[in-house]
Each structure stands twice: as C-alpha cells, then as structure tokens.
C-alpha cells in the first residue's frame, strides 16, 4: 500500500496533459520599402508595401477599390485599412495590417502618422490598433500613441484586400 501511495503522484503527473500552445498572432511580411530620409506620405507607402495599386488621396481609396479589389470589415494581414476623411484627417489615411493579434486588435505599419515633426513623415511599424465600434465592425478605431496610450477615435471604411499571389 505504501508503494502505491508513493507512485500515485508519479502516475497522476504522467496523465496530465501539457498546456495547449499559446495562440500565435497571424502575421505577414510586407513588400520591401526602400530606406529614405525623405518625408513619407501614407499613400505611396501603403501602395508599395501592400501591392494595392490605387492612386489619389487616402480617403478616395475605398470607392476606387470597388470592382478592382475585394473589400470588407475583417482585418487580414496585408490588407489596407482605409480611414475616413475628417477634420483632423483632411486627406484620410491608409495603413497596412501586419498582424491580427486578437478579435478586436491588430498591428499596422504606416507612414506619416502623428502630430509633430518627430512623428510626421516617417514609417511607424507594428502600431497597435483597437476596434472600438459598437458593432465590432472596425468602423471606429483607436491607435496607440507614441506615449503608449490609446488615442482618440477615428472612423474607417474598412479593409481593402491585396490581390492574392498565384501558387507556384
């Protein structure tokens, strides 16, 4: 009986299942963008790294994508997130999804986001974005500021999905 009591913890440990692996965020590698010291705008940057060939102000991309690219409200790696034109975003804004990190959180890489000369005209990589829309449809977003807090709410049209690559 004594041996059985000593063996019981070993037997129970052997039956325990290992913990499931932690969920890994789905991510993508964006197309390369050459390093530059020039002031960068969001539109040419997004076009280059996503492969979505749309021209014109960022807020016009949503309508221009109709019939050319798939559009939707689900974030996917490589998709272009299109912000609506507002008083603060007179030309709108576009950013490219790098990673989907949760049901209401993503990371984007984009250019020319910020409110001062230190943040304007440069690339911001893997910036957290949270969906705060009541309908959970990515129509209202908050981006993390340089200070590490979530900023004000911005409106978006949704996501433009790049063309799929043919399999080889």
Image (cartoon, grey):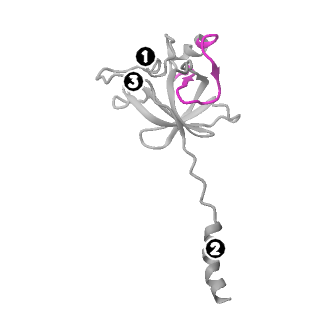
Any mark on residue 32, and which?
3
Question: Which residue position is annotated with label 1?
Answer: 44
Q: CA distance from mark 1 to mark 2?
A: 62 Å
Secondary structure found at label 1: helix
Residue that badge 2 annotates: 11
Q: Residue at x 39, y 24 (%)?
A: 32
Report the mark closest to the observer, 3 or 1.
3
Image quadrant where residue 38 sits: top left
Looking at marks 3 and 1 on the same chain, the residue that comes earlier in the sequence is marked by 3
Mark 3 residue element? loop
Query: Disc 3 and disc 1: Cα gap in Å?
Result: 13 Å
Position of 35 with respect to 83 (left or right) is left
x, y percent for residue 102: 59, 41
Q: Residue at x 66, y 83 (%)?
A: 4
Q: Nearer the viewer, residue 74 or 8?
A: 8
Residue closer to the observer: 63 or 164: 164
Mark 1 / mark 2, whichever is N-terminal: 2
Magenta stretch in the rendered image: 65-87
Upstream in sequence: badge 3 or badge 2:
2
Q: Quadrant of residue 25?
A: top right
- Establish if 167 lies above or below 115: above
Pick out the residue farthest to the bottom.
2
Q: CA distance from mark 3 to mark 2?
A: 54 Å
Q: Nearer the viewer, mark 1 or mark 2?
A: 2
The crowding category of the residue bearing disc 1, from other C-alpha atoms within 10 Å (few below 14, some 14 to 19, many at least 20), is some
Please tell me whether residue 5 is drawn above or below residue 49 in the rendered image: below
Neighbourhood count class around disc 3 (C-alpha, 10 Å): few under 14, some 14–19, many 20 upward: few
Left/right placement of residue 8 relative to residue 165 reads: right
Residue at the extreme left of the image, as rendered: 37
Q: How many marks?
A: 3
Instruction: Residue 35: give x, y in percent of width and height.
Output: 31, 24
């Amino acid at each position: 009986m004594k041996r059985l009591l000593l063996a019981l913890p070993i037997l129970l440990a052997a039956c325990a299942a290992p913990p499931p692996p932690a969920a890994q965020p789905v991510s993508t590698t964006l197309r390369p963008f050459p390093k530059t010291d020039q002031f960068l705008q969001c539109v040419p940057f997004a076009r280059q790294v996503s492969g979505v060939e749309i021209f014109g102000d960022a807020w016009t991309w949503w309508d221009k994508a109709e019939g050319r690219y798939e559009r939707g409200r689900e974030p996917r790696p490589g998709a272009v997130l299109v912000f609506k034109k507002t008083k603060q975003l007179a030309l709108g804004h576009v950013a490219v999804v790098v990673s989907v990190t949760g049901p209401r959180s993503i990371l984007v890489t984009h250019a020319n986001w910020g409110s001062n000369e230190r943040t304007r005209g440069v690339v911001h990589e893997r910036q957290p974005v949270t969906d705060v829309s009541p309908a959970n449809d990515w129509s209202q977003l908050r981006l993390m500021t340089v200070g590490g807090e979530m900023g004000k709410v911005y409106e978006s049209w949704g996501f433009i999905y790049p063309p799929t690559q043919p399999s080889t």
